[in-house]
Image (cartoon, helix red, strand yellow):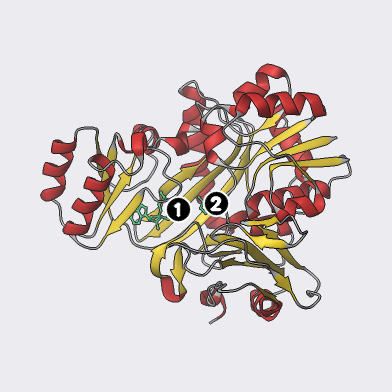
């Protein structure tokens, strides 16, 4: 089989790496890919927004399976376009991807079906939103409705900060049309966890849970990023809790989507917060999470391609999905200055052979014209390590990271620390 992976993050490098382990697969292509996918697959240089050219190229290459990583092409209906051409594509339709691309849509669905989430209100009218917000008290959360590359949410510690966020979304329109509507909701407190699930719309199978670290600095300090690290499994989120979330949140969501006329297939990512009142939904994503995927896929024992084909064929009930018990820890190495301004084009050096069960998944890294791997983004790569214990995985990842460097690089030192101390 020839498989095309769409996207260029560390998530897509990890997906391509796992897909290549399938005995069914002969060739993997990445579009546009990065230096990591170039080392194991063939990169195709096309912009993610050019869906007609992506389809044309896939037909030319006789692709047998397409795997879509990022949210933007999903929301733009790339899976629907592939279906029209008869090429099997893994991921939800554009209409179903609204669970991620419209927080309003997601909130209405949750409220209608009694799925636990934060109390809140939505507004498409700026004066009304402002009037409402002025009467609230901090902390409070302001969210842009649409896709904002993970930057659309402000957890405001003061009312002033919340009003500023509202103004930037609805007045300055920093996220464009994604800020036509906003949600203002209560600030929930608790540990966060990501539970991803494979679903064919009828059968839903959870993956192993993972935690993401969004803030740039140790101790959850500094601004939010695309994610600075992840680990799996979190000790505080055991089998009973997975079952509870599956039965009270994830399955009801999938059923509600089918009932509403938007059957959901692919991966559903549920971002949860463990409040004193039980687990509540923070967000849905219509795809694999980044950096969670880098810590989850090394634990998957079942053929990922077999799972994806079963999702597409609606035969997920026939498959037993198995996971390795060994924990995995992933640490993101970022460019100096990220998430603010940073330099690109810096050579990445690897000074020693990395230990067994240590992987590098590249993100913002490309091959320069002189054949070197150079930085090309804020989050440059994820290093993962697996071991029989979380302590072992954590020690191993931090023992190997010093061999990987580029000018100004930085990373968090506390990924999975709370699991071992
Ligand atoms: P999102 O972009 O929806 O993933 O939200 C980004 C982050 O904002 C989440 O991972 C949480 O850390 C935080 N967040 C979102 N909604 C809330 C809320 N209602 N209460 C507290 N934190 C929140
Ligand atoms: N880790 C959060 C996300 O993938 O959106």
Residue holding disc 1? 272
Nearest the eye: 219 or 49:
49
Residue holding disc 2? 195
| 2 and 1 marks in contact (CB < 8 Å) | yes
Q: Position of residue 285 (x, y in %)?
A: 50, 43
Nearest the eye: 223 or 24:
223
Is 136 placed left or right of 165 in the picture? left
Image quadrant assignment for residue 346 = bottom right
Q: CA distance from mark 2 to mark 1?
A: 8 Å
Q: Residue at x 70, y 52 (%)?
A: 13
Q: How many marks?
A: 2
Nearest the eye: 9 or 349:
349
Q: Residue at x 72, y 67 (%)?
A: 326
User: Is ligand 2 closer than 8 angstroms to the Cβ of mark 2?
Assistant: no
Q: Position of residue 254 (x, y in %)?
A: 52, 34
Q: Position of residue 316 (x, y in %)?
A: 71, 35
Q: Position of residue 71 (x, y in %)?
A: 53, 39
Q: Outermost residue toward the top?
A: 84
Reading the chain from its start, which is encountered first: label 2 or label 1?
2
Could one spot residue 177 in this view of the protein? yes
Nearest the eye: 81 or 39:
39
Could one spot residue 327 in this view of the protein? no
Which quadrant holds the N terminus?
top right
Above or below for 148 versus 414: above
**Secondary element at tag 2:** strand
**Secondary element at tag 1:** strand
How crowded is the residue under tag 1: few (<14 C-alpha within 10 Å), some, or many (20+)? many
Above or below for 19 versus 349: above
């Amino acid at each position: 089989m020839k498989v095309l992976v769409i996207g260029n993050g560390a998530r897509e490098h990890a997906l391509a790496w796992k897909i290549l382990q399938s005995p069914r697969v002969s060739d993997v292509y990445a579009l546009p890919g990065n230096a990591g996918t170039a080392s194991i697959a063939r990169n195709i240089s096309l912009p993610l927004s050019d869906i007609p050219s992506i389809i044309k190229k896939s037909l030319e290459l006789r692709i047998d399976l397409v795997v879509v990583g990022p949210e933007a092409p999903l929301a733009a209906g790339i899976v629907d376009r592939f279906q029209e051409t008869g090429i099997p594509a893994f991921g939800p339709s554009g209409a179903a991807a609204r669970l991620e691309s419209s927080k309003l849509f997601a909130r209405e669905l949750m409220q209608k079906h009694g799925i636990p989430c934060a109390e809140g209100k939505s507004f498409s009218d700026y004066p009304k939103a402002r009037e409402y917000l002025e009467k609230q008290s901090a902390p409070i959360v302001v969210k842009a409705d649409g896709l904002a590359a993970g930057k659309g949410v402000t957890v405001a510690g003061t009312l002033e900060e919340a009003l500023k966020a509202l103004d930037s979304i609805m007045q300055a329109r920093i996220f464009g049309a994604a800020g036509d509507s906003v949600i203002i909701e209560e600030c929930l407190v608790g540990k966060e966890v990501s539970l991803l699930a494979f679903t064919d719309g009828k059968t839903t199978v959870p993956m192993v849970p993972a935690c993401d670290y969004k803030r740039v600095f140790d101790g959850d300090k500094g601004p939010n990023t695309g994610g600075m690290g992840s680990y799996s499994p979190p000790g505080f989120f055991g089998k009973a809790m997975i079952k509870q979330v599956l039965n009270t949140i994830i399955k009801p969501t999938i059923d509600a989507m089918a009932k509403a006329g938007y059957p959901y297939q692919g991966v559903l990512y549920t971002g949860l917060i463990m409040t004193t009142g039980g687990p509540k939904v923070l967000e849905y994503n219509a795809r694999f999470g980044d950096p969670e995927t880098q810590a989850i896929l090394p634990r998957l024992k079942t053929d990922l391609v077999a799972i994806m084909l079963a999702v597409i064929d609606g035969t997920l009930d026939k498959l037993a999905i198995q996971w390795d018990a060994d924990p995995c820890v992933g640490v993101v190495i970022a460019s100096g200055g990220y998430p603010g301004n940073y330099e690109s084009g810096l050579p990445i050096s690897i000074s020693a052979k990395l230990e067994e069960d240590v992987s590098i998944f590249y993100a913002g890294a490309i091959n320069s014209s002189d054949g070197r791997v150079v930085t090309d983004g804020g989050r440059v790569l994820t290093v993962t390590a697996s071991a029989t214990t979380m302590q072992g995985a954590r020690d191993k990842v931090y023992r190997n990271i010093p061999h990987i460097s580029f000018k100004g690089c930085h990373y968090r030192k506390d990924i999975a620390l709370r699991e071992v101390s």
